[in-house]
Image (cartoon, rainbow, N blue to C red):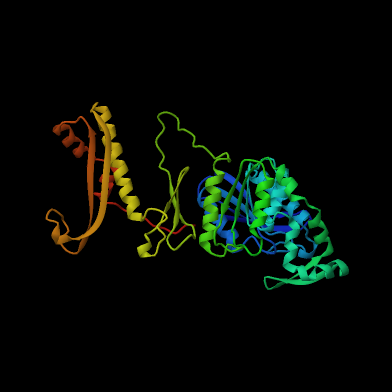
């Protein structure tokens, strides 16, 4: 997955560090991601979600808010309003160099920020929040014991996630001024709320308030036992899967352009990329198509998709059925439907009398073809003969040279 790293100017005049995660092929859409309070663009949840969405064709821009990660400025001078303004400027940057984001995603306080910024990003058609508070001032519970001192003294250094941060009175005042639920009621964009019922940082009641305030179309998805920061990669991968599937309904996905008549066919690249959702899970992109590969639970996978040999058999089966259909239609045979059932096994070479290999193990694919329709014995025999001529069959039974090289 290629990643462009750059800087853009934030609302305070500082340079904010950004990363744009791109699909291997042309993006079908662009998304803007806002990280959680005191986190960074490179925290595990942000990286995993961005990678999973990029594997599905959606480019994702994530950046560090003022004073966090690799961005300039002082965190103490940042407010919820300045974060919202930085999100709008990030969208402006995307609009200038690529195209404006049509999907906004926010985690925790970043979720509240994208909800507040959405009205200022007209191209955005869908907003997804993960463990978002219904009120920006909710974040003050993280340092509740210092709030009175902050109001009295103007600023206090507090410890958040084991790191020191200075919180100013301006931050408290600014957060309290935002009526986020009123903004959600006027969102006029599709909304997806993801939240774990057991989230002990931002309670599930926040999701309830957001959902009730929003107008349709709106959706809620439970993150089950996930923690607030989506520390388990499976939870981050699941969130990304849900967001990508949900967003397809609302985004203007790039549509393939038909080649001129007579133009030579250009083979499409197949891109396979780890999702992080389990030991073996991979996302597969073939042009506009998306699918998933995995291994069975018995060998350490999650069985969330077909395995490599399953996909190989699927290719042979699909090619067989298509080749038979082309022949039957051309010869006007009364073939109603073809069903191909395949299996793969390793066998001892000495058990195969007609195989060239005589020592060790070899691969054996069994293909059973059922034809439906008023076909006579001669026609069925011919279709079986044609099945052996499908291009994938020929590839598997001919000399194949695979060239492997490292990406530049």
Residue under the image location 27 percent in, 28 percent down: 329
**Viewer-side residue, 387 vs 337:** 337
- Residue 58 image offset from top left, x and y in percent: 55, 48
Residue under the image location 75 percent in, 46 percent down: 182
Residue extending furthest toward the top: 332
- Residue 164 image offset from top left, x and y in percent: 73, 72
Q: Is residue 172 visible?
A: yes
Residue under the image location 46 percent in, 55 percent down: 273
Residue extending furthest toward the right: 152
- Residue 213 image offset from top left, x and y in percent: 69, 46
**Viewer-side residue, 219 vs 168:** 219
**41 lies left or right of 241:** right
Whether 321 is drawn above or below 129: the answer is above
Residue extending furthest toward the left: 353
- Residue 202 image offset from top left, x and y in percent: 66, 61
Whether 234 is drawn above or below 158: the answer is above
Q: Tag count in the figure?
A: 0
Q: Is residue 402 visible?
A: no
Residue under the image location 87 percent in, 70 percent down: 153
């Amino acid at each position: 997955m290629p990643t462009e790293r750059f800087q853009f100017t934030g609302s305070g005049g500082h340079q904010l560090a950004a990363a744009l995660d791109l699909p291997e092929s042309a993006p079908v859409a662009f998304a803007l991601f806002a990280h959680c309070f005191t986190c960074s663009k490179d925290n595990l949840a942000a990286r995993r979600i961005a990678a999973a969405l990029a594997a599905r064709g959606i480019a994702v821009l994530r950046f560090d808010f003022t004073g966090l990660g690799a961005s300039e400025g002082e965190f103490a001078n940042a407010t919820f309003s300045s974060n919202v303004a930085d999100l709008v400027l990030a969208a402006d940057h995307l609009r200038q160099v690529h195209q404006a984001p049509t999907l906004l995603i926010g985690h925790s306080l970043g979720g509240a920020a994208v909800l507040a910024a959405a009205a200022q990003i007209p191209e955005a058609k869908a907003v997804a929040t993960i463990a978002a508070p219904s009120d920006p001032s909710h974040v003050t519970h993280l340092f509740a014991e210092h709030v009175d001192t902050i109001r009295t003294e103007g600023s206090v250094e507090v410890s958040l996630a084991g790191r020191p941060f200075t919180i100013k009175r301006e931050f408290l005042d600014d957060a309290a001024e935002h009526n986020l639920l009123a903004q959600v009621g006027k969102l006029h964009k599709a909304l997806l709320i993801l939240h774990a019922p057991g989230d002990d940082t931002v309670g599930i009641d926040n999701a309830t308030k957001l959902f009730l305030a929003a107008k349709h179309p709106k959706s809620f998805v439970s993150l089950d036992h996930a923690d607030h920061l989506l520390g388990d990669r499976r939870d981050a991968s699941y969130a990304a899967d849900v967001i990508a599937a949900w967003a397809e309904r609302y985004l203007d996905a790039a549509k393939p352009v038909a080649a001129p008549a007579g133009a030579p066919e250009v083979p499409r690249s197949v891109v396979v990329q780890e999702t992080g959702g389990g030991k073996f899970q991979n996302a597969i992109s073939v042009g506009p198509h998306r699918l998933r590969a995995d291994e069975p639970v018995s060998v350490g996978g999650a069985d969330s998709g077909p395995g490599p040999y399953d996909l190989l058999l699927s290719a042979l089966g699909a090619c067989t059925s298509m080749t038979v259909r082309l022949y039957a239609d051309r010869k006007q045979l009364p073939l109603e439907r073809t069903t191909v059932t395949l299996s793969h096994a390793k066998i001892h070479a000495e058990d195969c009398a007609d195989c060239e290999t005589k020592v060790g193990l070899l691969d054996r694919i069994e293909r059973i073809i059922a034809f439906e329709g008023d076909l006579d014995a001669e026609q069925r025999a011919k279709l079986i003969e044609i099945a052996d001529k499908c291009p994938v069959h020929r590839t598997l039974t001919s000399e194949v040279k695979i060239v492997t090289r490292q990406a530049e």
